[in-house]
Image: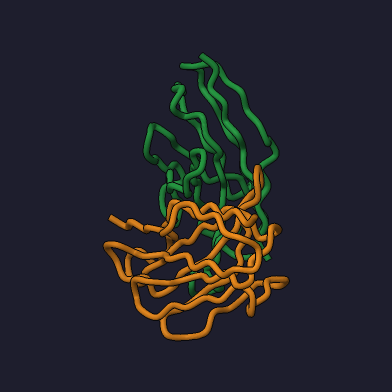
């Protein structure tokens, strides 16, 4: 149980284009989803927290107009990197947290490798 | 605020030898503690967690960790490692719902390399 998927697993795009990454909880309802980015050989840095049906809460230094997050249902959150630039190239990982018995644990997706040319 | 320290960025160990990956945390309130493993180009997989109760926690793949409140530590151990244990290991803490936002705070990670 507690499986989280991400799509796509890899994406290469040209500078200036937008990229959408999906995060789905497959076997539980995720009241809260988190988006992280990870640079090579570094830890995960929290970008934003999204609760179903409400606006995302962004961490300091993360541009909300550049990283659009939508959490429209209890099983799906999307991250759209708008007007991507090479410095946005990174490994993006989502996690999901349920309520009730699973509320204390985040379950992570497999990550999305974004490369902006 | 909470913080997590993983002092060892890299730990090489021979196959079938024991290993301990260290994790210390700081927090003004009670915390939950987690260990995650990340294989190359993959997301994080939960190894084990401590929420309450017994301070010795057993996880998957033969790993265990012990919560030591007085030393604010949550070290990860395995008595005999395999080649397949080579990965990055992250320690993390969160604050229970009733006292905080329950966000995860990660350490910087420890790269475990098992040598044949």
Q: In the image, is residue A95 above or below residue B99?
A: above
> Residue A80 at what x, y percent from top left?
53, 71
User: In screen coordinates, is A38 left or right of A75?
Assistant: right
Q: How is the image coloured?
A: by chain
Q: In the image, is residue A113 above or below residue B101?
A: above
Shade of chain A as shown in the rendered figure = orange
Shade of chain B as shown in the rendered figure = green
Looking at this view, name the residue that lies furthest to the top. Answer: B116
In this rendering, the count of numbered labels is 0
- Could you say which is closer to the camera, residue A44 or residue B52? A44
> Residue A98 at what x, y percent from top left?
37, 69
Q: Which corner quadrant of the image does residue A37 belong to?
A: bottom right
Q: Residue at x 65, y 42 (%)?
A: A41
Looking at this view, name the residue that lies furthest to the front. Answer: A14
- Could you say which is closer to the camera, residue A77 or residue B62? A77
> Residue A7 at what x, y percent from top left?
41, 59
């Amino acid at each position: 149980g507690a499986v989280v998927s991400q799509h796509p697993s890899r994406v290469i795009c040209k500078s200036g284009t937008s990229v959408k990454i999906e995060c789905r909880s497959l076997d539980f309802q995720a009241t809260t989803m988190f988006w992280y980015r990870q640079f090579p050989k570094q830890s995960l840095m929290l970008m934003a927290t999204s609760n179903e049906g409400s606006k995302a809460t962004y961490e300091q230094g993360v541009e909300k107009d550049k990283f659009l997050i939508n959490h429209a249902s209890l099983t799906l959150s999307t991250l759209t990197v708008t007007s991507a630039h090479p410095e946005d190239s990174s490994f993006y990982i989502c996690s999901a947290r349920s309520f009730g018995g699973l509320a204390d644990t985040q379950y992570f997706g497999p990550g999305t490798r974004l490369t902006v040319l | 605020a909470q913080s997590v320290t993983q002092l060892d960025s890299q730990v090489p160990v021979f196959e079938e030898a024991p290993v301990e990956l260290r994790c210390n945390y700081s927090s003004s309130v009670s915390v939950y503690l987690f260990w995650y493993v990340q294989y190359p180009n993959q997301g994080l997989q939960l190894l084990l967690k401590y929420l309450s109760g017994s301070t010795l926690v057993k996880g998957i793949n033969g790993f265990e960790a012990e919560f030591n409140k007085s030393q604010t530590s949550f070290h990860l151990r395995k008595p005999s490692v395999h080649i397949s244990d080579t990965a990055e290991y992250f320690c993390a803490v969160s604050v229970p719902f009733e006292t905080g936002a329950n966000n995860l705070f990660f350490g910087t990670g420890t790269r475990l390399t098992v040598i044949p």
